[in-house]
Amino acid sequence: MSKLRLIIQREFIAKVRNKSFIIMTFLSPLIMVGMGALVFFLMQKNDEKIKKIVYVDNSELFSKADFKDTKTIHYLDYTELGVEETKKKVEEGDFYGALLIPKQDSLEILAKSIEFYSKESPGMSVMNSLENKIEQKIRNIKLTDFGIDLDKIKASKINTDIKMFNFSGEQSSKLINGLKIGVGAIAGYLLMMFVMIYGTSVMRSVIEEKTSRIIEIIVSSVKPFQLMLGKILGNASAGLLQFFIWGVLLFVILTVVSSIFGVDVVEMQSARVPAEQMDAVKQATEGDKGQMVVQEILKLPILKLFVLFIFYFLGGFMLYSSLFAAVGAAVDNETDTQQFMLPIMLPLILGVYVGFATVMNDPHGSIAVLFSHIPFTAPIVMLMRVPFGVSWYELLISMALLLVTFVFMVWLAAKIYRVGILMYGKKPTYKDLYKWLKYKG
Amino acid sequence: MKNLLEINNVVKRYGDYTALNNVSLAIPKGSVYGLLGPNGAGKTSLIRIINQITMADSGSVILDGEKLAPHHTAQIGYLPEERGLYKSMKVGEQALYLAQLKGLSKSEAKKRLKYWFEKFDISAWWNKKIEELSKGMAQKVQFIVTVMHNPKLLIFDEPFSGFDPINAQLIAKEILQLRDEGATIIFSTHRMESVEEMCDEIALIDKSNKILDGKLDDIKRQFRTNTFQVGLNTQNPLEVERILKESFKVYPSDFKLLNDSLTLNVKIPTGKTANELLSFLTNRGEVQHFVELIPSANDIFIQAINKNN
């Protein structure tokens, strides 16, 4: 047991002292926050530029009231200048674009014959907003023609907000569902990244011992299984340490950033929600939205998620890194690992895809449930499902399956590892690996 | 208990390939035991079994009267042929780690390492990384790591490869001193001159089988051919050679003397003695050279392997 402790210690120290670990640990949260700030900043900058759009309305149906200026788009009536002159002005670059509304006999034809000229192709959002305006106007005219009172239509408008409940008494809403998706996706994705990064780190460490030829000296003192286990646990501890440091750093940085710049983190997020949706949310809550989001986040099972993340990280990591260790033992150098890496990476990537594709639509659908029980994808998919509430027996079954599988995989990988570490020269085939499994002692 | 290590009928197979076929050896306490054999004979397989890196399929290994068990790794020191150290780890840290894996406490390991580092005059390397040292320097560290826990049994696989003659001499001296202090040494090598120099007993393994073992002197006696190198200063060398051939087997010589003497290799047939040959020679001239041709370890190695093939 003390030998195992020595090995874990050495692996941990070797990993933590490594420059790339230090850089990754302390720089990535800064980079992440920096990137976020940059995106936010660029979005602000981008929106600041005001687009001037001129319109020529020969139909005489529209008025200035239909083209209200927004923060980013200003409308100018150039009907008197005429179509050709206006087009010229746009071509000379005075304006962003020209909306040309011809005179037509029927509204149906008019709807199809409006044109927009611009020097550069316009953004989707500009076109959508123009089309919306015209559609709305024409619809209103038609409604009036049918003799329908527009005021009554306005009065009949009502916003529905179905309140969602589950039987543990939690109230949820579309917003919190979005949050759950976000938190689950981040946890699942983070887990995959950790398994990949630390798994390859285990593999590299095995290859290093092989190429430096110290391996035979080590295994004359300890059992290969102990060495492999020590490596895996040492790297796992380094991974957990990094995870904790990230958590603390992110918290500190966010606190500092928001207090210095007075930027409400929540505002930053909601800035990206499209305007219409914002309106809906605003009307629905009638309260301080920021406060509500914070409350909703606090309602998420953060502690449960945290504990499960640690469990699934350790379980998933043990499962995969033992395979990585076996691959490292089978080859002489890193370039030879490609062929064996693919089958290891596939289930990880599949987990993330299945998670994104199914959990978001239906967190308790049969596919999502199935993949959250298959041990190779369970750590990722289950973490994505957890924010939506997973029954304890499902969690227990999934965790038990993971435990049993990783014990089996560690045992299997150790057999390949044990033989592989002393083999040099020829790159082994899958057939060789199978043969190694059958070697005695 | 006369033998420190007894290997009884050990068999090791890898799939269809038999690496060791019923090999038995007895290694006396306090001896330097040469484990010889061509490449791929099965030496490394045997050494790995003794080190419990792999297990024998059948047969037993007894160390100092006890069946080989995991705790015995602390009593064995092993310098593999393919050896190395963690390149980016500091010399001292690394030696401490390996010593602790062999069961030494940290303070005890520090004390022993200090002794050896001073003995080899390499204390200044303690905080250097292995990648900063030359190959010979790294080999010295490797030697220390092998012996620092005072093991009962030391196994050296080609210990001199990579050493310059001066350091090889130093290591050879250390190995013999360790034997004198009570350690038993298994010494695997291809370099036959070092076998002559160091080994008390040898075993020869070829194609997974042991084909020869015993005290080096006994084996030499066994391979003795009763052939003498003879140098004679005579007036009539052709005549002497002709008469000599009537009673002895005569071969052309494979050595030279400083003057133009007649030189021959003469084999004494059964029933005749060396004295008879000597008196024949003294009667015909001045005997300048008369030495029994003792088979070298090299000769024995080649002969035995050829015979086995």
Image (spheres, coloured by chain):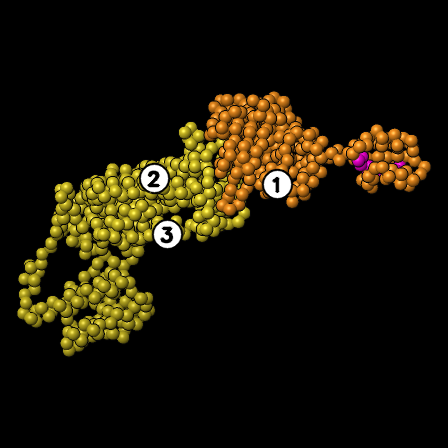
Rendering quarter of residue A309: top left
For badge 3, the amino acid type reads Leu
How far, Cα to Cα, is label 3 from label 1?
Answer: 47 Å
Residue B287 shown left or right of residue A308 in the figure:
right
Residue A42 shown left or right of residue B2 in the figure:
left
**In the image, which is nearer the foreground, mark 1 or mark 2?**
1
Q: Secondary structure at mark 1?
A: strand
Give yes or no for contact between labels 3 and 2 (Cβ–Cβ under 8 Å): no
Q: Residue furthest front?
A: B271
Residue A26 sits above or below residue B143 on the image = below
* Residue at (58, 32) in percent of width and height: B25
Q: Colour of chain B?
A: orange
Residue nearer the viewer, A312 or B125:
A312
Residue B31 shown left or right of residue A153 in the figure:
right
Q: Is residue A350 magenta?
A: no
Label 2 neighbourhood size at 10 Å, few (<14), some (14-19), many (20+)? many
Task: Look at mark 2 in the image and give the residue it sits on.
Answer: A314
Task: Look at mark 3 in the image and give the residue it sits on.
Answer: A346
